[in-house]
Amino acid sequence: MATDSEKSTILVVDDTDDVRDLLRMQLEFQGYQVLEARNGRQAIDLLCKQPFDLMLLDIMMPEMNGYEVLEQMRAEPGLQRVPVVVISAVQDLESVVRCIELGAADYLPKPFKTTLLRARVGALLEQKHLRDREQAYLRMIEDERAKSEQLLLNVLPAPIAQRLKAGETVIADSCPDASVLFADLVGFTDFAGRASAAEVVNTLNGIFMTFDELVEKYGLEKVKTTGDAYMVVGGLNLPRPDHAEAMADLALAMCASADSFHRTDQLPVKIRIGINAGPVVAGVIGKKKFIYDLWGDTVNVASRMEAQGLPGTVQVPEVLFQRLNTGFEFRQRGRIDVKGKGEMQTYMLLGRK
């Protein structure tokens, strides 16, 4: 007996009771589960209701003959994988050819030999089980590929991930005008030193997931998170002329959303944000544990705007103030000593005009 016989369900389709009874007894003796249909229409109804591993099909039947059954199965994608053995008293070559052309896997003449039927059924079922296992394996590979792609998208912007998948080995880009945002959670290091690991991770995850949604909403790109710091770029891989305005809108939305969060110690979440715009260099560093990052004076100034900002505010340099002041309201903070740059005039972004 076949090792997979208990797992195999066979549909016997014949309008003659004696033939169905004979086939059913032979197949059940081999351990197969057998269902019967008296005509082609009943067969199609059963095929649509449950899966079958094999069908034994007569040709000359009332209501719907075997040819019509094969034609309908070929037209239905869900039925095309069911192997069919035609068992018929019609033995002319034309009928055999027609059945094979319509998708039948084999053709046995009546009266059939039991040993030959057993061999054909066993061989076809083994082939089907192999195909089913192959399809399951391919689905598993596709699922793993999808998971890998999602992990890649969690690390890299989508356009960069696509370039890596396409085979680019060195990704280094220069952009003459992009916006850069840095955000940092004020006092979070002290909180992390007192709270449990689960509390720290859950708090960060909730905040950063909200930030991720806002970044997507405003058509910008998250670059990375480092500890409790969050970095965004605009106008780089997704070019848009209004990237600075979109980044300002994002910064205001991030500040507003932070006010709705509370840490497990019940203290409010406050963030500092710094923004700048200008030329940047971007690229992927590393091969096994790679990271996508940005470099240049624009990036450094944006980082300094955040680091030397005030809790709950968005700080920008003069160059960005001049670019945005027609559409946004600002408050002048005054000149501050910026590491690596000396004194710089800075402004606090308040909102849209």
Image: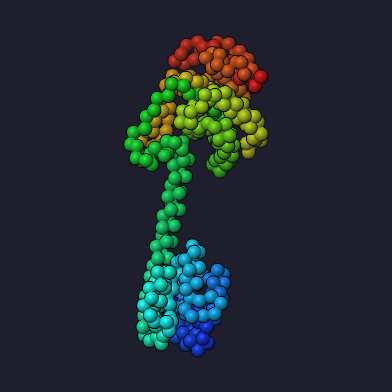
Quarter of the image holding residue 104?
bottom left
Q: In this view, does 315 lie to the left or right of 268?
A: left
Most distant residue in the bottom direction: 18
User: Residue placed at 44% from the left, 57% from the top?
Assistant: 139
Seen in the image, is 248 located left or right of residue 162?
right
Above or below, 198 relative to 211: below
Residue 139 vs 23, above or below: the answer is above
Q: Quadrant of the C terminus?
A: top right
For the N terminus, the quadrant is: bottom left
Q: Which residue is drawn at 42% across and 50% down?
A: 145
Lateral position of residue 90 relative to residue 351, left or right: left
Q: x, y percentage for residue 295?
A: 42, 24
Q: Where is residue 170 in the image (x, y as percent from the top left)?
A: 34, 33
Q: Which of 38 and 292 is in front in this view?
A: 38
Residue in front for this viewpoint, 65 or 261: 65
Which residue reaches farthest left?
169
Q: Position of residue 308 (x, y in %)?
A: 54, 19
Near-viewer residue (124 or 261): 124
Q: Is residue 251 visible?
A: no
Residue 166 coordinates in the image, percent (x, y): 37, 40
Q: Does the image show residue 158?
A: yes
Residue 299 position (above or below residue 84) = above
